[in-house]
Amino acid sequence: MTLPPQEAADALEEIQRARHRSATAYHDRKASPHLFLWGVIWILGYGATYAWPKEAGIVWWILVPIGFLGSWGIGRRGAGGKSASANWRFGAMFVVAFLFITALFTVLRPQSGEQAAAVVPLLIAFLYILVGILTSGVRIALVGIGVGALTLGGYFWLSPAHFVLWMAAVGGGALILGGFWMRGV
């Protein structure tokens, strides 16, 4: 039995769509634990910044390395601990992100704590959107759009005294909800 050319083409196209959906679901599930982790980091970090603004720098200098080590561990566990290339790339990403944010804050010195508290989430939102565009990951792009919009909304419409509390609840919450959504729950 032979398959007419159009039916064969349609079947191959459907296989390609199924492959793409499967790969997207796989990558979303791999990303979700990172969103959970960073959502908790944001809740703790911005919550502590709200409660103890003078110690905010110390809090973030403790939480960010914990977050990166946690993400590294999640990635290593997901790779079965076998990928030296992934470990090298993750370390390089951390160094590049740290240097970029340091350079950004050096050149464009924030005039307030709220500006500093808004810049990093906007950068993260931008990166999530880029990753979504480059990988056809609609969900991660939408998480980035949500985080960016919530950050800008809070920055422009809330009093500076309440912005970091907003970022703790809404920024961290958006990441956690995004993690559940990408996990498929």
Image (cartoon, helix red, strand yellow):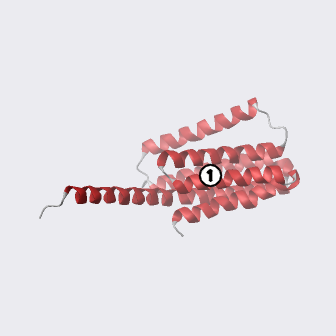
Rendered image quadrant of residue 38: bottom right
69 or 122, nearer to the observer: 122
Out of 66 and 178, give the one closest to the viewer.
Answer: 178
Q: Quadrant of the N terminus?
A: bottom left
Quick one: which residue is furthest to the bottom in this view? 185
Measured as percent of width and height from the top left, residue 84 is found at: 43, 43
Q: What is the number of callouts on the image?
A: 1
Residue in the image at 70% along x and 52% along y:
149
Say above or below: 15 vs 55.
below
Which residue corresponds to the image point at 46% horizontal and 44% vertical from the top-left?
Answer: 86
> Residue at 72% of width from left, 46% of height from top?
61
- Residue 139 image offset from top left, x and y in percent: 55, 57
Residue pointed to by mark 1: 144
Q: Nearer the viewer, residue 35 or 64?
A: 35
Residue sitting at x 68%, y 56%: 41
Q: Amino acid at mark 1?
A: Gly
Point out residue 109 in the picture as x, y percentages from the top left corner.
79, 34
The kind of secondary structure element at disc 1 is helix
Q: Quadrant of residue 150?
A: bottom right
Q: Is residue 12 left or right of residue 114?
A: left
Q: Residue furthest left?
A: 1
Q: Residues within 10 Å of mark 1 (few under 14, many from 20)?
A: many
Above-or-below relation of 131 to 98: below
* Left or right: 75, with 123 as reference point: left
Q: Where is residue 52? Give x, y as percent.
A: 85, 54
Check the picture and name the quadrant holding the C terminus: bottom right
